[in-house]
Image (spheres, grey):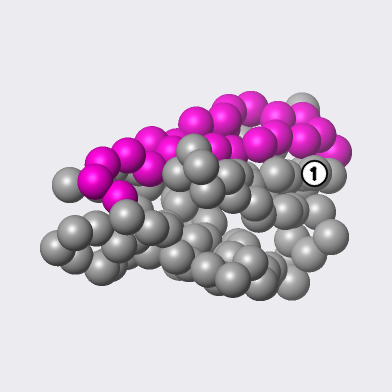
Amino acid sequence: QVQLVESGGGLVQPGGSARLSCVASGRILSINAVGWYRQAPGKQRELVASMLGGGGTNYADSVKGRFTISRDIAKNTVYLHMNSLKPEDAAVYYCNLNVRTAGYNGAYWGQGIQVTVSS
């Protein structure tokens, strides 16, 4: 069983910064591709940022230059550093990790964490 716990969301002023964390726990052998998604009310969930096992990254055009995805392999933790936040960045953010365990390779989702951007 693998669990993902997200933290770091909340209320941020426009132009401000925040860092989301996603900690994976369980009988994890390795974590491969990771990603952050977001879903705003009335909209589909969209990929915000992703990182392949080799470290290559990909970002949605709307966040390029403002958001950075990173990971701490030793801590089984993935981060999303968000700078210059805009009201349109407000959403529930979800981490998605591709995890290898002893008996399963697959993707797991975090519970979601709210980010509100407002003055």
State how many labels appear.
Answer: 1
Q: Is residue 47 left or right of residue 84?
A: left
Q: List x then y, in percent, for residue 58.
A: 66, 72
Query: Which of the pair 4/25 is nearer the observer?
Result: 25
Which residue sits at x=81%, y=54%? 66
Question: Which picture quadrant has residue 3?
Answer: top left
Which residue sits at x=19%, y=59%? 102
Could one spot residue 51 in this view of the protein?
yes
Question: Which picture quadrant has residue 24?
Answer: top left
Could one spot residue 47 in this view of the protein?
no
Q: Which residues are magenta?
A: 5-28
Which structural element holds mark 1? loop
* Residue at the outermost left position: 103
Q: For label 1, count other residues whose C-alpha is less than 10 Å away and answer few (under 14), some (14-19) or many (20+).
A: some
Tell me if residue 92 is in the magenta stretch.
Answer: no
Tell me if residue 13 is in the magenta stretch.
Answer: yes
Q: Is residue 68 left or right of residue 32?
A: right
Query: Which of the pair 51/41 is nearer the observer?
Result: 51
Q: List x then y, in percent, for residue 67.
A: 74, 53
Query: Which of the pair 9/80 is nearer the observer?
Result: 80
Q: List x then y, in percent, for residue 70.
A: 65, 51
Q: Amino acid at mark 1?
A: Asn
The rendered magenta stretch, by its main secondary structure, is classed as strand
Which residue sits at x=52%, y=48%? 73
Above-or-below relation of 110 to 114: below
Q: Quadrant of the C terminus?
A: top right
User: Which residue lies under the disc numbered 1?
Assistant: 83
Q: List x then y, in percent, for residue 77.
A: 50, 42
